[in-house]
Amino acid sequence: MPNAYISGTGFFVPPKIVTNDDLSVYMNTTDSWIRERTGIIERRYVEKGVGPSDLAIPAANDALKAAGLSVKDIDFIIFATCTPDYYIPGSGCLLQEKMGFNEIGVLDIRVQCSGFVYGLSIADQYIKTGEFNNILLIGAEVQSTAMDLSDHGRDTAVIFGDGAGAAVISATSEKRGILSTHMHSEGKFLKELWVEAPASKQGRPRILPEHLDQGKQYLKMNGKEVFRHAILRFIEVINECLLANNLSIDDINMLIPHQANLRITQMIQKKLDLSDSQVFSNVHKYGNTTAASIPIALAEAINEGKIIKGDTVVFASFGSGFTWASSIMEW
Ligand code: UT7
């Protein structure tokens, strides 16, 4: 049975930098409040007309190049996004067309901040069964257009940003790659982090002028509840993947947690007694890019030489749903 490993990574963030001071023009906030509570210094926003599939193109090109592959070598695309270019069709279809892939299968998945880790699990199954040899996994988001840039939305708007990360998952006969993935959800917390409209259950049309007036089109978050659950679930799911593989905290060479908030990452690090060199963080530069955050961080960690062959790498995510997941691999 082949193993599935990450043969190439890439990332892209839009060039427009939005600093904390830039946000304070629109809402009652300060650079020091945002830094202290989240560790975020700046994030990137797209220009009007740019969607996740556009951000995914340079990320995918870099991942293909790093893997030594071309678009013709890819057998399947998994596109993780909760901010698709359109609701119909999925962003995977747009990427297939824009990059000239063969008429291969494309699968859009949601699961919000956990999209990339869930996607790894899907790719792992297809590779291990021998169905596909090379799968392109994208995490890409345009969250900026779901932000309420007024005082009403300031607790959420300061956190999120736009970006894309890509990984090629390939088959290998070597003893390396994904060891296991672990996925969870708890839908009773759906309203703690959600966008209420447009929605099919609202009736026809799916969004009304009063919904817009009430700001139902914006991402809403109960930050304190999300924070509390995130700490618990991150720790649980990291321990779960270690236990499943008979490994311990000391065996982790690199933990790449979903980049939600520096305070969350620091708490996980402290509770698990991980050293600084075992944990990667870049939330200060990009904010929370939802499904894109782990593949962006992974690509940066690799570019910085922080992950090398043979390393034990752990990914862990938590987000809207709630959903949470982990994946552990031998690099
Ligand atoms: O992928 C998962 C995604 N989400 C997360 O991981 C987020 C998890 N949660 C958090 O990161 C934190 O809860 C936040 C950073 C969102 C908020 O931090 P907090 O320490 O929980 O603050 P808070 O919501 O309790 O608000 C404290 C105060 C409030 O004022 P009062 O009621 O004490 O007068 C807020 O109105 O800070 C106020 N506030 C702000 N002030 C300045 C809320 N947002 C802002 C802001 N600037 N942007």
Image (cartoon, rainbow, N blue to C red):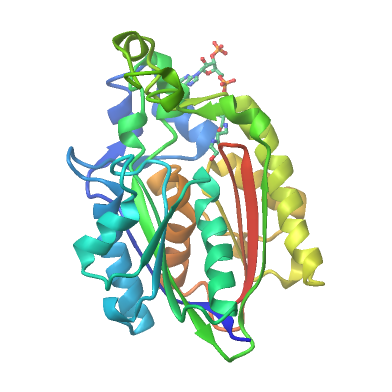
Choose between 74 and 281: the one closer to the eye: 74
Residue 276: give x, y in percent of width and height: 62, 59
Reply above or below: 68 against 272. Answer: below
Q: Is residue 51 left or right of residue 123?
A: left
* Image-based side of 69 in relation to 194, left or right: left
Q: Farthest residue in the bottom direction?
A: 173
Q: Residue 155: percent from the left, percent from the top?
A: 47, 23
**Which of the four quarters of the rendered structure image does ligand 1 lie in?**
top right
Q: Nearer the viewer, residue 331 or 267?
A: 331
**Residue in the image at 43% along x and 72% along y:** 135
Q: Is residue 319 above or below residue 330?
A: above
- In this rendering, is residue 27 above or below 183? above
Q: Residue furthest front?
A: 204
- In the image, residue 122 lies at what x, y percent? 55, 64
Q: Residue at x 33, y 9 (%)?
A: 213
Identified at 17% across, 41% down, the residue is 49
* Residue 312 in view (yes/no): no
Residue 264 in view of the camera: yes
The spot of residue 133 in percent (x, y) is 46, 81
- In the image, 166 versus 99, the foreground residue is 99
Quadrant (top left/top right/bottom left/bottom right) for the C terminus: bottom right
Q: Residue at x 71, y 57 (%)?
A: 238
User: Where does the N terminus fall, quadrant-wise?
Assistant: bottom right
Numbered marks: total: 0
Q: Is residue 177 above or below residue 200?
A: below
